[in-house]
């Protein structure tokens, strides 16, 4: 492989690994998976995050407690750029967050903004060293997706915010019972 091609492959690999770090963050926080969330950060990392500024382990405690007060929440990752310089990188990742609180019941927050990160590659692993979360907008309203509304859909598998969620099933097996219920409701 010539040097130019090797450099291009290395740059693409670095960018893919940095985006994978962003995905570990989002999935870790949404599944309340402390180990996965922690893997997105290096030791000693600092997070400046909408009402919290401090070290990564304290941030994780704070964030998991906050999301524990919600019935549903998701972090969506959108546009992403990464400027890589050797073992250092700066990334900007747009996000959209949707969360529904337990109290007041079904109070929904939708916010969007950007994660601006400084990352380092240590021992071959890209992870966050410094993060600033910039909020661009927040909208609050009542959610129409209540537990009662979800219960009305036959065969719906309940999403979980832990390792009992379907995304952890290996191998994943779709429910044959749910398929039967759907078939019976569409005939007739």
Image (tube, helix red, strand yellow):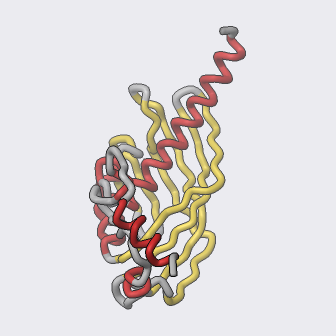
The residue closer to the viewer here, 7 or 185, is: 185
> What is the quadrant of residue 105 in the picture?
bottom left
Q: How many discs mark residues in the rendered view?
A: 0
**Where does the image place residue 164, in percent across and percent down from the top left?**
27, 59
164 left or right of 126 in image = left
Quarter the N terminus occupies: top right
Q: Would residue 27 be visible to someone looking at this image? A: yes
Q: Is 109 drawn above or below residue 116 in the view shown?
A: below
Residue 68 is situated, as x and y percent measured from the top left of the image, at: 31, 71
The residue drawn where x is 32% and y is 77% is 69
Which residue is at the far top?
2
Quadrant in the picture for residue 32: bottom left
In the foreground, 134 or 26: 26
Residue 139, x across and y down, in percent: 58, 81
Residue at x 46% of width, y 63% of height = 49
In the image: residue 159, left or right of residue 142: left
Image-quadrant location for residue 39: top left
> Left or right: where does residue 52 sit relative to residue 114?
left
State whether residue 59 appears in this view.
Answer: no
Identified at 37% across, 49% down, the residue is: 172
At horizontal 72% and vertical 15% (from top left) the residue drawn is 4
Residue farthest along the right direction in this orientation: 4
Q: Position of residue 115 (x, y in %)?
A: 55, 56
């Amino acid at each position: 492989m010539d040097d130019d091609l090797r450099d291009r492959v290395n740059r693409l690999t670095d960018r893919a690994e940095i985006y994978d770090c962003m995905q570990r963050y989002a999935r870790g926080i949404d599944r309340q998976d402390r180990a996965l969330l922690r893997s997105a950060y290096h030791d000693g990392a600092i997070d400046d995050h909408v009402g919290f500024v401090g070290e990564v382990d304290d941030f994780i405690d704070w964030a998991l407690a906050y999301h524990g007060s919600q019935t549903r929440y998701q972090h969506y990752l959108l546009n992403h750029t990464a400027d890589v310089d050797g073992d250092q990188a700066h990334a900007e990742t747009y996000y959209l967050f949707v969360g529904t609180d337990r109290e007041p019941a079904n109070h929904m927050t939708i916010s969007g903004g950007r994660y601006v990160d400084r990352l380092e590659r240590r021992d071959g692993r890209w992870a966050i060293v410094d993060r600033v979360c910039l909020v661009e907008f927040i909208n609050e309203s009542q959610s129409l997706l209540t537990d009662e509304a979800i219960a009305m859909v036959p065969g719906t598998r309940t999403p979980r915010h832990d390792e009992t969620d379907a995304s952890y099933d290996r191998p994943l097996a779709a429910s044959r019972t749910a398929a039967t219920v759907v078939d019976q409701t569409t005939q007739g």
